[in-house]
Image: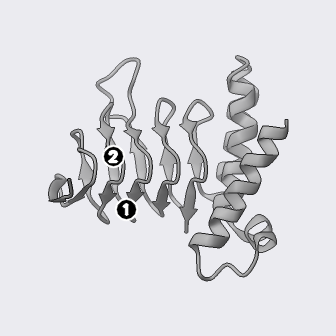
Amino acid sequence: MKKFFINLYEDAKNIYEKDPACRSIIEAILLYPGFHALFFYRISHFFYCRNLFFIARLISQIARHITGIEIHPGAQIGRRLFIDHGMGIVIGETSTIGDDCTIYHNSTLGGTGKDKYKRHPDLGNNVMVGSGAKILGPIKIGNNVKIGANCVVLKDVPENSTIVGIPGKVVNKKS
């Protein structure tokens, strides 16, 4: 239970530190839908991990209606995820998200409909997903990757890269 509250505090503090419009940690807790979505996700994930799938999905669907952000309770989310202007974000069941990532509105971590078990992408640490980006299928996005707005990513992306376009192409790779 202590870890639950530590994670929530880190989430709120992260919003305050990353968003110049946020004036306090209390403001992040009370007024930011990205924080609310993570709060409900952490509760639904608790139930999901205990095979209480109906309760987990019920909580996640309530959160979706409140926030406009859909996070499947089976997703694995690391520490300090920043969901900015979160309306329309979808994070699929088998997605994993590393620490210190940022996801902007209307983005999808989704499946392609072709895969059976692992269907959704894995994001490394410190990944930025631009507005409207679609990352589809069981692919791996390396650490320190920037994904441009409206990019469609269908293949693995190496670490320290910037990817843009439809389909996504690496335009910058730092070693």
Say whether residue 175 is left or right of residue 148. Answer: left
Q: Quadrant of residue 162?
A: bottom left
The residue lying toward the viewer, choosing from 16 and 47, is 16
Residue located beneath label 2 in the image:
135
Decide which of 63, 123 is in the foreground and name it: 123
Q: x, y percentage for residue 147? A: 31, 58
Can you tell which mark lies on residue 21? none
**57 displayed left or right of 136:** right
Q: Quadrant of residue 44?
A: top right
Q: Is residue 101 left or right of residue 138?
A: right
Where disc 2 sits, the SS reads strand
- Per the image, the residue denoted by label 1 is 132
User: Which color scheme did the rendering employ for the protein?
Assistant: one colour
Q: Position of residue 12 (x, y in %)?
A: 71, 62
The amino acid beneath tag 1 is Gly
Residue drawn at 26 percent across, 58 percent down: 151
Q: Amino acid at mark 2?
A: Ile
Decide: is 54 above or below 148. above
In the image, residue 54 lies at what x, y percent?
A: 72, 25
Residue density around tag 1, few if under 14, some if 14–19, many if 20 or more, within 10 Å: some
Tell me the CA gap for discs 2 and 1. Answer: 10 Å
From where the camera sits, is residue 15 visible? yes
